[in-house]
Image (cartoon, coloured by chain):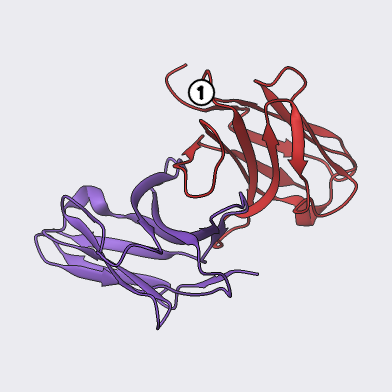
Chain colours: A purple, B red
């Protein structure tokens, strides 16, 4: 079974600053994927970044990067140069290599202050 | 279509009523998923289709929940005899092949309120 834990219900950041959202997970499998999804008030989940567990290199997408610590089962998201449009709920998620049951954390609400 | 479309966007039902929620996935997407998102929580997996075949329904909370995708495109999630605990946002997602790790494209969900 997989579980995903996000311990920060809310975070805030000043515009143009950097913020890190935390996520830990638990799985006994060795092959899996990790994701960060953004959910704005429109409710539509949007993929922010994805990491394959077998890759040691941390994924990066423009201003978004992850710190993937496989041994510690930690997968944090760093947002650099925060923008007002980054304000949303952020969900960490995982699924196994051969499984379609994606598990989500409870989410972190990010506020960006102008 | 341009994205995953769900209807209705909002649904209010009296306890005991049956409801049907529709999902229109991106054209050509083989896989379709339903998730239930309670207020203040992350989405929870309900069921998964590959084309018209329902390959996994382990997340359906009771036999009052039923999903179908008869022609491998549009899907309907039906909830019979709705209860207050069924109140949630129901999200639909689709993907090209449904293999692990593939990007999911989500709709905007249907917010169900059971009074």
Residue A61: x and y in percent read 21, 50
Question: Which residue is tagged 1?
Answer: B26
**Relative vertical location of residue A96 with respect to residue A18 in this rendering, above or below:** above
Relative to B63, residue B49 above or below:
above
On screen, residue B84 versus residue B40, left or right, reads: right
Which quadrant holds residue B5?
top right
- Where is residue A94? Give x, y as percent: 50, 60
Residue at the spot x=53%, y=49% of the render? B100
Residue at 16%, 54% in the rendered image: A63
Query: In the rendered view, would you say A90 is above or below B63?
Result: below
The picture quadrant where one finds residue B71 is top right
User: Number of labelled discs?
Assistant: 1
- Which residue is situated farthest in the bottom direction here? A72
Residue in view at x 54 percent, y 25 percent: B29
Q: Is residue A71 left or right of residue B27?
A: left
Of B35 and A33, nearer the camera is A33
Give how far across and how far down residue A37 sits, in percent: 40, 52
Q: Is residue A88 left or right of residue B95?
A: left
Q: Nearer the viewer, residue A25 or A19?
A: A25
- What secondary structure is found at the residue carrying circle 1? loop
Q: Counting other residues with Cα less than 10 Å from the Cα at mark 1, is it few (<14), some (14-19), or many (20 or more)?
A: many
Instruction: Say if A84 sits above or below A23 in the image.
Output: above
> Foreground residue, B77 or A71?
A71
Apparent side of residue B66 relative to residue B76 in the rendered image (left or right): right
Q: Chain of mark 1?
A: B
Q: Of residues A97 and A15, which is closer to you in this image?
A: A97
Residue B88 placement (x, y as % from top left) = 66, 50
């Amino acid at each position: 079974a997989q579980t995903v834990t996000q311990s920060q219900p809310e975070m805030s950041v000043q515009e143009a600053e950097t913020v890190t959202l935390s996520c830990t997970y638990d799985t006994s499998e060795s092959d899996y994927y990790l994701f960060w999804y953004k959910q704005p008030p429109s409710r539509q989940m949007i993929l922010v970044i994805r990491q394959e567990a077998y890759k040691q290199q941390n994924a990066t997408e423009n201003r978004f990067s992850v710190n993937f610590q496989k041994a510690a089962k930690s997968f944090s998201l760093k947002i650099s140069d925060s923008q007002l449009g980054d304000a949303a709920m952020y969900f960490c998620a995982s699924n196994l290599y051969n499984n379609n049951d994606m598990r989500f954390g409870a989410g972190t609400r990010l506020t960006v202050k102008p | 279509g341009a994205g995953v479309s769900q209807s209705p966007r909002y649904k209010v039902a009296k306890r005991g009523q049956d409801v049907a929620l529709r999902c229109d996935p991106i054209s050509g997407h083989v896989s379709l998923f339903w998730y239930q998102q309670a207020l203040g929580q992350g989405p929870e997996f309900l069921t998964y289709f590959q084309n018209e075949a329902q390959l996994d329904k382990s997340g359906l909370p009771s036999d009052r929940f039923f999903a179908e995708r008869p022609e491998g495109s549009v899907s309907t999630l039906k909830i019979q005899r709705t209860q207050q605990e069924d109140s949630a946002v129901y999200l639909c997602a689709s993907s090209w092949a449904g293999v692990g790790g593939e990007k999911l494209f989500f709709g905007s969900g249907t917010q169900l309120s059971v009074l």
